[in-house]
Each structure stands twice: as structure tokens, then as C-alpha cells.
Amino acid sequence: MSIAQDLPVAPAHRTARRAAPVWWLVFCREFVDLWTGGRVLVLLVLFSLIMSVTSVLRQLESQLSLIPPVEMVFLTVLSSITFGLFVGLVIAADSFSGERERATLEPLLLTPVRPRQLVVGKFLAALTPWPLTLLISVPYVWVLGQGDDSIPEALLLGAMLGGLMSIAFTGLAMIISIWSRSNRTSLFASLLVYLIFLIPTQWPGSAQKGDLGYLVQQLNPLQASSEFLEKVVVNNRTVAEKMPYLMAAIYAAGGVLLVLMLVAAPRLRLDVEASRPGRSRWHRGARSEALAGPALVLALLSVPALGLGTAAAAAPSVSGGASGLSITTDLAYKTVNAGQSIKFTTVVKNTGSTTSAASNVAMNIIKTGEGEPVDPEDWSPERTQGVDPLEAGESDAQQWTVNAILKGDYMIYLTVIPEPAGADATTYPVSSPGIHLTVKAFEKSNPGGVLPVAIVTPLAMAAIAMVPWWRRRRQGSAESTEG
Amino acid sequence: MTTETSNGHAEEPRVILSAEELRKSYGAHQALKNLSFTLRAGRVLGFLGPNGAGKTTSIRILTTILPPSSGHFVVDGVTSDHPAQIRRRIGVLPEGLGFPRQLTGARYLSYYGQLFGSSSHDARSTAEALLQEVGLQNRGHSPIGSYSHGMRQRLGIARALVNDPAVLFFDEPTLGLDPRGQRELLTMVQGIARDRGKGVVLSSHLLAEIEGVCDDVVIMNAGEVVARGTVAEVIGQASHRSGVALRVRVPVGEVPAACGLIATLPSVRATTPDDSTGWIGVELRQLNGTAAADPRLVNTMLESLIRADVPVLGLDAGSGRLEDVFLQLTAEAIR
Amino acid sequence: MTAGTVAAPLAPARRSAAPVWWLVLRQELTELWMGGRVLTYLVLYSLLMSLTAFLLATNTELNLLPLRQNIVVAVTSALTFGLFIGLAIGAESISGERERATLEPLLLTPCSPRQVVAGKFLSALSAWPGAMLLTLPYLVVLAQGHTVLGSALVWGGVVGTLLAAMFVGFSLIVSIWSESSRVSLFICLLAYAASLIPAQLPTEFLRSPAGVVLTLIDPVESASTYLDRTIGSGQPLSQAWPFLASPVAATLLTLAVLFGWAAPRLRLMARA
């Protein structure tokens, strides 16, 4: 008779109530820690102080009222997004590396809890500052926007974009935290990544244009979000028009979530090396992350060979109008490459019997079909030219230069606008025939000779950065330790 | 460690550290109430006390990290008004000390040597000598990140010696070490005092080892000193208060029977059994104000236990242990 | 208990061959640069600059951006990056040592805290010249032989050094009073972000009197305007100097607070 048979069997305990899911337990604990610790609240107080100062400035300074309300709405919503995602990033960067350093991760991993559930709970807790940030910004948006009609749309889009950006950057920081040996490294790396995405948003507007500029905008979720919000809220573009930018934000958030939940979370271990995916050279030490960069840069820099542009001219055409003025052009159509400029001449003639009023000739460019609207200021240094009063039968010529910036199909047209006689009068603008401009893609692979420097410098830096790492390996980082 | 005078009399070593009525308050909370003691060169002073007793606060005050709320102290003739001068004369191994992972042990010691005022050449020589002394000569050029905990503690001791101090402070140096490591480290500490003639202040929870290493002890509880003196004096004070002259250990189940047997002996006044460990304290009858000392008491007691077939697992015929004193004094203080 | 019977004479301090600030600086530089941390960041920065330079060069060919403006963007990017790195290093220089329990032995030496802080200040500052040096090849190729290169190097160096010193100094002040790196880093970055706020305001406002005042008060915005005027528009110092005054004043004030007030109060615990 075995001992086991003599042992009384304890009755199976039935739990009266099902235990809450682990991710919820972790979330609640993290949430309480975060908010009762006081620091997030202090930051939100700071944020509201900054918002208050801006609002007061707005009310006191009449000069500031030069900014249209809708633009103030956009700026305020953008500020809250920037702040919210920043707070989430810093919290997430501390989430696992901090617990490792404080030696509080081990007891968590010693429970039967799956690591993914831990990650979900912490991730959701790290996202909580964002909604409150947006909520705090609502009264300021209302005040600064002076109750503008764009406010509801701006808040809704801001909530969506802010949520996406918070997910993307909080998730990214959490991935870095899972893979970082120390809190310091994790914080540093997270902020650095944030900075690299942030710097292009600080470039002047004209530096962000061009095909490559627009591509970079769409690759950078921060830029894409800002661009989307501005164009839809301030410039009244439709969401459909700006969908590529919204998709960039969605892809960023989705991509980061996938990596976090499917790659990083299941591998969460006490030991950092065991947490990192695989033992391939891609993830050995911090230096190897630098290798990913050249691949990306080279991909971006690979541009097809230079094409040839063709030039064509056409016979000028004429049209008249009730004002007695007519305008003709000496160019009907032309095909060029992006980066080339075209010159043409218009002639304004007084076909009437009396002296004409002084007039302005204004140039406009539109893109045929769908696509990025044209900002004429980028295409031509001079959008209007003045014409003095013309005697009957007299004419005046104007020279124009247009720089082909983006590939596409365009129509250039010019309008003569006679000055009205007074406040109670008006005039009839007269339009020229269109100049059909076909622009082929910019295909210079080495603009300004920058390519060699752009490739060699990072490679050289990477080689220099490998030196300390290689020295440490030589010194024997795997020396056996003695008791 | 005493020195002989010219007429052959032993001269007490000089006082190397003295503290008078040191106090430290944080608002309404008094972390240290009234610390006074002296330490002579070549001796080891043990700071004992439960967590929160004020040991680390005391050490931080004596090492100029924290200013006292009142009181003063003197280190090697330098008063507490001159903290920079005091720091030249002390070496400290703080509790939980961190180390830069990528620096080698030799470079680490050399750096601190230079910070204490040595030239780079002298600092390097001193570093090599200290590494030899603490047994790290073969690992001195490896990064500290590759050291075990024991090695790091030894490196910490070496760093504390880099400026050839007059007084050394070790705050919980044996924490996290295995028994062999603890023993080696405490031997090193003892050697520093005896062989180098330094004054050593040692704060620890390892009471059994402290008893073997320390010459003097200060027992603290809740910021107050509850006992001080040499180890023998402190144990004797507690034994005198408790009256326990010797202790015998029997199996836990035999404690009642053993107590009954021992109590029948003529010179035994009472027994104080510990039912959880099986130790039985034996209090002797008082004769003319002192405990009756029967030189054959131990033999008689053992004989009666053996005759009754009670296994004797241990015997402490001395006056007691520091651990008992510590527990007794800190429990009294709590009460 | 009585005090000692015989007071030992004060031992004379032995003179070190090198001053303390130099010893600390050398040690910190070794950790930062040979440890590989700053080099890794500079690799990332060079990737960013490669992309930036390619974009700027493309835009020049497309006549989107004048050459001078290209140079301003490149210098400003170097500044933004170098300042951030210096700020982040400075923010954790003291609070990080507290967390890693390596501050106490430093305080147990007879070194003056001011010298320790000076060494850490200079080492945190070292990231900026590294970033500027790395920007040099990009500036050379973007300038395409134009004389603006000289102006960019001179004024970029001067303004960058001023701002770097100001930010590093500020971050060290915060670090001295922070228990943890996370707190000090956060505060420093908030201050950095706040200094970037004026740049987000529309150009029309910045040109107004109130905008000019705001620009002059904010040393970062003021410095940026100065670079824009000198490098971007070719204005001489005699015209653009008001915008240099703000960063100079802010830097001097920060350093005075750091070395005159904060450094002597360096303690083991932030709130001792």
C-alpha cells in the first residue's frame, strides 16, 4: 500500500468568482502607480500652464490675432499630440528596463502570467496620459479657436492621430525598453529615435517639398500626421485627398504594435540577451542597429537614371474679353524634367478703342487630374506683374519663369485683371489659353555631388563606432568570473 | 594593539575617532539621538543594530556625507568643521556601492588615487599594490563588469585604502557574499586594523562573525545606543542582567524533560528554555550577590542528562553570545 | 567618553599632477566615447544628415530652396541634434550616478564638488563639437564652393557652443536636484521643447513687435533667427547682433547659477 494512497485528498476548491484577466490586473496596478505617484499629474499641470500662457498671450497681444483661428486650433491640437505622445514615450521607455534595474521584474516573471499579458497591461497604462492631455487641451482649443467651425473636426482628427502616434511611439519605446540592459540606454535610445523623426518637422516648408520631400513626409509618421492635420483642418482638403498621410500614421502604429506583441512581448525575459530576437548579428549589441540605417538610406537614394526632357513650342493663341484687353502666350505646351525651368512671354494688348485701366496679370498653375495641389509660390518667383494703362491698340509684354518642381501634368494660365474704377465698380478678368506643361520625374541620382558624402560619412562613423566594441571583445568580455 | 613605552609599560593606542552627542533629525523624526563613542587605532568597532537603527546614518555623518543636526566628532585629530580634511583621512566602503562596468580595476583605483592627490605614476603603483593585497592582481586589467560580487567588494576595500587612511568605515561589507567570501573579507578587515594599525568601523548583521572580528561594539536601536564597550563587556552586561551562566542544547522534544533534570541541580536557580531551537539557558543561584560558580556544574549537568538518555546536541559554557545580547537589548528597547 | 588625548597634526595635502576637473573630465570622456554611447548616436545622426543633405541638394536643383537656406537647415539640424545629446548626457550625469550608487565614492574624496561638476560639464559638452565636426563634410558639399561655408562654420560654431553650454549647464543643475535620471531627463526635455515653441508660431506673428520680443527672450529662437540672418541672408554682425545677445546672456546666467550656486550644494541625496 503506497503512502500516496494514505494521504487524504484535499477537496478541489472552486473559485466562487473568475479572476480578472491578467492584463487588466497589471493595467490597474500600473495605472494606479502612474497616477498616484503624482508625476504625470505634475506634467499635465505644466502642460496646462503652457496652454494658459499661450491663451493669455493671444488675448493680450493684438498682434497675435493675425493668426487665423483655424490655424490656432491646428497648432493647439498639434501641441497636445506632441506632448501626449512624448509623455507616453518616456513612461514606456522606463516600463521594463526600469523594472529590471529596480529588481522588480523578476517577481512578475515568476508568476504563471504570460509575458504578453504583462506587456499589454503596461502598454495600456502608458497610453493613458494621452486622452487626458487631449481633454485638457479642449477648453484652450475653444478659446484660441474663438469657437471656429473647424474645432469639432480638428478635435476628432486630433484624437485619432494622437491616438495613432501615441500607440506608435509608446510601443516603440516599450520595445526598446524590453531590449535594453539599463533604463538609461532605453530612455536615451527612445528619445533619440523620437528626435530623428522630429527634426525633419522643423525644416522650413520649402525643404519638405519635391517628390523626395513628400516621400520623406509620408515615411515619417510625425510629419505625415502634422501634414494631414494641417491640410485637412486649415486648408480644407478632404480626408480622401490626404489619405496617404493618414495611412502612414496607421501603418506606423500597426507596424509597431505587431512587432511589440508578436516579436518583443513573447520574448520578454529577465535577462536582456534572452529577450532580444535571435542571436543574429543584427541584434548583437547596440552597434548593430546602426547597420539598419545604411540599408534604408541606400534604398531611398536609389533613383532611376537620368531621363531626357523634350521641349516643344506651339503657335500662340488669342482670346479677348469685355474689358477690351486680350492676352496671348508664345507657348502652348512643353515637356520638361523636374528641376528644369521654362520661360515664356505673354502679351497684353488693348483691343478696345479707349485707354485701358491699369491691370495686373496673375499666373496660376493647376494640376490636371488628382494629386498634390500646386503651390504656385514654389513654382514661380513672380506670380503677378503689373501693366500700365494701355492706349488703344497698344500692347505690353511680360516675361515669366516657371520652375518645374514635381512630376505631373499641369496647366498654366494667366489672367489679366483690370483695376476697378472704385468701390462700387468691378471689372472682367480675361484669361489666356492654357500652357500645357508635362513634367517628368527628377532623376538625378547625385544632386549637387552629395551622394558620396551621404554614403561614406555614415559608413565611416559606423566603422569608428565599432572600435570600442571590438576592443572590449578583445579584452575578453566573456572572461570567467571567480568566486 | 598596544605599544610599549620606554619603561616597558604598555601604552594604549591613541584615539583615532571620537564622537560626542551626535544627533540627526529629519523634521520631527529623530534618526540619531545621541551617539558618543571612541575608537583607538588598531581596533575594530562594530556598529550593530536592526534595520532603521541609525547605523548608516551614523556612518554617513562620520564620513561627512551628511551633516549632523548637533554634536561633533574628531577623526585623526581633525574636527568635524573640516570635512575635506577628514575625507583625506578616511576610507569608506558604503553599502551597495556601484562600480563603472567598463573600467578596469586598476584604472578605477588609479583614478581614485589621483582624486586623492597622487600623481598618475604613484596612483598606478598604489593601485597595483592594492590589487595584490586584496587578491585581485590577476584580474586588475579586466573590466569591473566581469567581476563577481565578492571581487567587487574586495575592489571596494582596495579603493577605501587608496589614500592610506587612518580610519576605515565598512557598511555591511559582507552582504550578498557566500560564507567563504564573508570569512575572507572579515579576515581582511581584521588584518587592516591589526597589521596596518588603522581604526575600523564595521557595520554588519552577521553577529556571530562580528563577535570574532570586533574589539568594541556599539549596539543601536531606533537611533539610540543601547549598549557599548568591548565585546566581552557588552555580553557580560547582558548576561549579568539575564543571569544566564551557560546554555545546553537538546532535541526540541526533550526540552521539558531536560529542564526538569537541570532544575534539580543544587546551584541552578532557573532554566530558560527556547522550545523552537532546543537551547536551554541555565541561571545560577546568587551567593553574596554573585552567581554561584560550581566548577563541576557542567560535568554534573551532563552526567544527569546522559543518565536520563537525553541527547546533548550542544553546549555553550561561556558567558553567552552577542546574538543573544543583541536580540535581548533590541527587544527590550522595542518593549 | 573623552576625545583623543593627543591630536595628530594635520597632514599636508599632496599635490596631484593634474587638477580634479581634468581627472573627472578625462574619466567621463573615456566612458562616454570609448564606451561607445556617443559614437552610436553620431552614427544615427550621420544617417539623418545624409538623408537631409540629399533632400536639400535635390531641392536646390529643383530651385525650391536657395543654397544659403540649405546651409541654415544643415547647421540647425546639427544644432538640434548636438544640443539634445548634450542635454541628455548632462541630465543623467549626477542623478544617474546616484542611481548607480557611484556618486558616494566621488563625494568621499577631498575634491571640491565644483571641480567634479566642471569635469562632468565639459564631458557632456563634448557631444556638440562631435556633431559639428560630422556636419562639416555635408556643409562643404552643400555649399558648392560658396563663401557661405565660412560664415556657416564660424557662426554655427559660436552659436552652437553657446547653446550647448547653456543646455548642458541647465541639465546639470536639474540633475543635481533630481533623485532619478528619468525625472531630470524629463524636465530637461520639457524645457528644450518649450524653447522650440516660438518656432512653431506663424511667421507673420514672429515678424510683429511681440514676436520679435518673444524671439529675443527665447535664446533658442533668438539663436535660430541670428543664424538665419547671418548665414541665410548674409547680414553682418553689426545688424544681427541683438539676436546673439540673448543666447550669450542666457548662457552666462546658466553657468553662473551652475558653478556659483548649484555645484557647491552637490550632495549624495538630492533632497538632503
Image (cartoon, coloured by chain):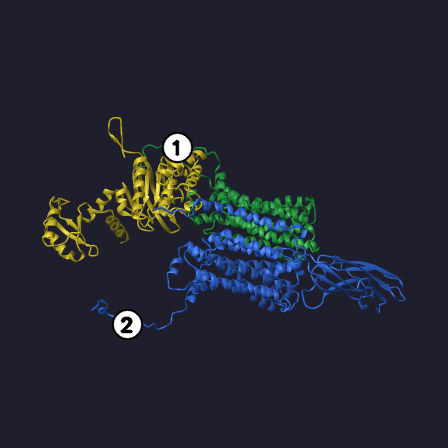
Chain colours: A blue, B yellow, C green
User: Which quadrant of the rendered structure holds the C terminus of chain B?
Assistant: bottom left
Q: In this view, does A192 lie to the left or right of A20?
A: right
Viewer-nearest residue: A313 or A189: A313
Spatial distance from mark 1 to mark 2, Cα to Cα? 77 Å
Residue B62 seen in the current view: no
Return the x and y of residue B234 as percentages of the image width and height: 24, 44
Residue drawn 43% across and 60% down?
Answer: A268
Between circles 1 and 2, the one closer to the viewer is 2
Number of other residues with Cα within 10 Å of mark 1, as a class: few under 14, some 14 to 19, many 20 or more: few
Secondary structure found at label 1: loop
Asked whether B26 or C156 is in front, the reply is C156
- Of residues A93 and C39, the one nearer the viewer is C39
On residue A11, the disc is: 2
Quadrant of res B274: bottom left
**Which kind of residue does numbered mark 1 sit on?**
Leu
Q: In this view, does A95 lie to the left or right of C83?
A: left
Q: What element carries label 2?
A: loop
Q: Is residue A454 left or right of residue A334?
A: left
* Residue topped by disc 1: C10
Q: Do labels 1 and 2 share a chain?
A: no
Q: The disc labelled 2 sits on which kind of residue?
A: Pro
* Residue B293 visible: yes
In x, y percent, where is residue B317?
17, 46
Around disc 2, counting alpha carbons within 10 Å, would you say few (fewer than 14), some (14 to 19), or many (20 or more)? few
In contact (CB < 8 Å): disc 1 and disc 2: no
The x, y position of residue C140, in whole percent, is: 65, 46
Asked whether, in this view, residue A283 is left or right of residue A16, the answer is: right
Q: Which chain carries label 2?
A: A
**Quadrant of the snapshot with the N terminus of chain B:** top left
Point out residue B2 in the picture as x, y percentages from the top left corner. 27, 33
